[in-house]
Image: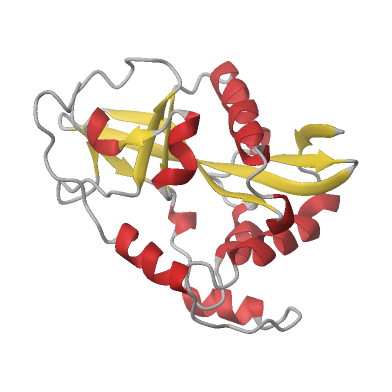
Amino acid sequence: MVSIRNEEPRDYEIVENITRNAFYNLYMPGCVEHYLVHIMREHQDFIRELDFVLELHDEVIGYIMYTKATLTDEAGNVKNILTFGPLCIEPEYQRRGYGKLLIHHSFEKAVSMGYDTVVILGMPSNYVSSGFVSCKRHNVCVEGDKFPAAMLIRELKPGVLDGRKWYYKDSPVMLVNPEDAKAYDDTLPPKERKYLPSQEEFYIMSHSFVDELSSDESC
């Protein structure tokens, strides 16, 4: 009934439609995620081996995509890691565990390829059950020594980040131009762009940072 395989060209339009259906008006009026999917596949940081679709009764209902990212310590040492996103399930099939199946299937493949760390930006409530923790737990920050509340870490090999301070940088493909995304969206069947309360929730989370943890919390 349920199977996971690598995405193929025949899936591209289906995957983009799933993305548009799932993200439209969720984080902003309209969305940019389907445009990101559209351009990501041709980017040098895209990892085809970690591009999976999930089928239910031979119908694609979800997918996960990965790109390369890096962590750099204070001595300038660079560590190659992963980030995933978009991760998407067709709205009518959400909250049934399919996203978690994709995450853990892709983790197994990532480990076999030699990767040991995944960093994502997302709503913590969606990912802590898959082993993700606050970036502060592993001393991973962004420029300016800030620890975004939405930045989450999963060590695929426990202890690999070893407590030193790391600075995260994702792929340039993630810097989507909203005007380009809107222009692409305008070529597709029309959808109503509107405000939803979830957009304010996302704004608050994406502009929040974690304070310093006390010594007992950092363990």
Return the x and y of residue 189 as percentages of the image width and height.
76, 80
Q: Give the residue at x 26% y 29%.
A: 138
Q: How is the image coloured?
A: secondary structure
* Count of numbered marks: 0
Q: Give the residue at x 9% y 31%.
A: 214
Q: Is residue 202 left or right of residue 212?
A: right
For this orientation, the residue located farthest to the right is 58
Return the x and y of residue 168 as percentages of the image width and height.
30, 41
**Which of the pair 105/43 is nearer the observer?**
105
Quadrant of image for the N terminus:
top right
Q: In this view, does 76 lie to the left or right of 65?
A: left
Q: Name which quarter of the figure residue 53 lies in.
A: top right
Return the x and y of residue 85 as percentages of the image width and height.
54, 48
**Which of the pair 81/5 is nearer the observer?**
5
Q: Is residue 18 above or below residue 114?
A: below
Q: Is residue 183 left or right of residue 123?
A: right
Q: Give the residue at x 37% y 15%.
A: 158
Return the x and y of residue 31 as percentages of the image width and height.
55, 71
Q: Is residue 176 above or below residue 58?
A: below
Quadrant of image for the C terminus:
top left
Q: In this view, does 210 lie above or below 108?
A: below
Q: In this view, does 160 lie above or below 44?
A: above
Q: Name which quarter of the figure residue 163 lies in.
A: top left
